[in-house]
Image (spheres, grey):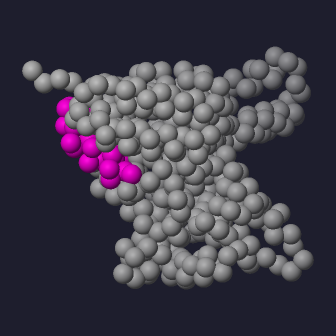
Amino acid sequence: MSFLLTSTKTIKLFFAYSNSPKDKNLRRDLESHLKCSLQSLRIIINWQKNQMLPGRDWKQESYKHLNTSQVIVLLVSPDFLAADDCRDITKWAMERCSTGKARVIPVKLRLIDNWQATPFGHLQCLPDNGEPITSKFWRRQDDAFVNIVEKIREEVEKIQEDQRQLQLIQEQQKAEFFGSINRFISNQSLNRIIQGINVPTFSLGIAASVIGIAVLLGFCNSSPDMQVKNLLSQGQDKLDKRDYQGASENYTKVLKIAPQNINAYIKRGDARYSLKDYKAAIKDYTQAIKIAPKNVDVYIKRGHNRHFLKDYQAAIKDYTQAIKIAPKNANAYIKRGDAQYFIKKYQAAIDDYTKAIRLSPDSVDAYKNRGFVYENNLQNKQEAIKNYQKAATIYKKQGATDKYKKIISQIQKLQQRKPQSSI
């Protein structure tokens, strides 16, 4: 069955972008790089608005391609976030991502404020260092485009590998199925069953065919790829309903069918984390890392679980690895700062929170946590107040009234606190 290793279905990619002239120019450059690099792969690329035949409704056509694509690439910019049609497409893309029906890859075309607050802020973005294509970090924009195309190629190849694994499983199940049919017929079990219900002899062949077709149809309707899709969807539904044990069981079934399904490992890890089974969650995230060793979010998730087990050194290693892969990931710095605090490396924690703030000036947790360290461990009252005040400003802007009131109360108490007298 070695021929199956090269037998994969065509992968469909969908690219969404805004109508602004700046974004269109960047899209055209990206398209040139894609044509040059990905032409050897079995892929179909569809764009949100171009390549439409005259008289066609581009919205209808876009959603048609969006609903059948395995990879959805969002070309993100301030104009993209402001456009109603792009917001609608993003919402639907994230729904397909959450159910395991598609993989969403956000690409930073231009600089935007507070990336983590976007609907896709938790996903690994491209370029993989977090710098937008238009950033001065890139001496040549072509370098950024090459990085993006390389990562998209890797994603496509992962999907193709999953398909190959599914095909192998399907062929094995088909072989077992037809082997069972042959054994069933050869030992005359079918003959006895049919005679027992008074089927005429001349109808034996027809009856055998009908039974075989019925069983085969049942087999097709429960093919591995359909089972995987259904189980992933059911698992997500259970996660949404906080049935974490049920969700975990669904993802376990997926992995029995498709052992390399990274989404199942990550989602089962999420479910186990919610069940406070941190060790099991760590095992799942570790398996996911073996499949995709540059997935920043999985390192952060594994670090978070290690943090809950008070294995702070291991957590720091995970956050550090995430930072190596994506040096502009503010969340990784915040999480590492939290772990540094618990091993009493207070200045290191301050440094991490400061880096997070530089990367994402609206990182309220970074301000709040930095203020806490200044207040309780470094005895720097004025710096603590400054950080709490900044966090309060962000909470007010976000409309988080309760959190705003709580931190204002904390500031007032700190302001009224008398300095400790020296003995």
Check residue 28 for magenta coloring. no
Residue 310 position, x and y percent, is: 27, 25
Q: Nearer the viewer, residue 368 or 34?
A: 368
> Looking at the image, which residue sits at the far left?
423
Residue 60 position, x and y percent, is: 83, 63
Please say if 139 is above or below 260: below
Please say if 305 is above or below 90: above
> Looking at the image, which residue sits at the far top?
196
Residue 367: in sight, yes or no? yes
Q: Is residue 54 left or right of residue 392?
A: right
Residue 157: in sight, yes or no? no
Q: Nearer the viewer, residue 87 or 112?
A: 112
Check residue 340 for magenta coloring. yes
Quadrant hosting residue 195: top right
Task: Give the magenta part as a residue range.
Answer: 332-357
**Residue at the image position 59 percent from the left and 59 percent from the top:** 71
Please say if 29 is above or below 422: below
Quarter of the image with the C terminus is top left
**Residue at the image position 59 percent from the left and 36 percent from the top:** 400
Q: Nearer the viewer, residue 16 or 44?
A: 16
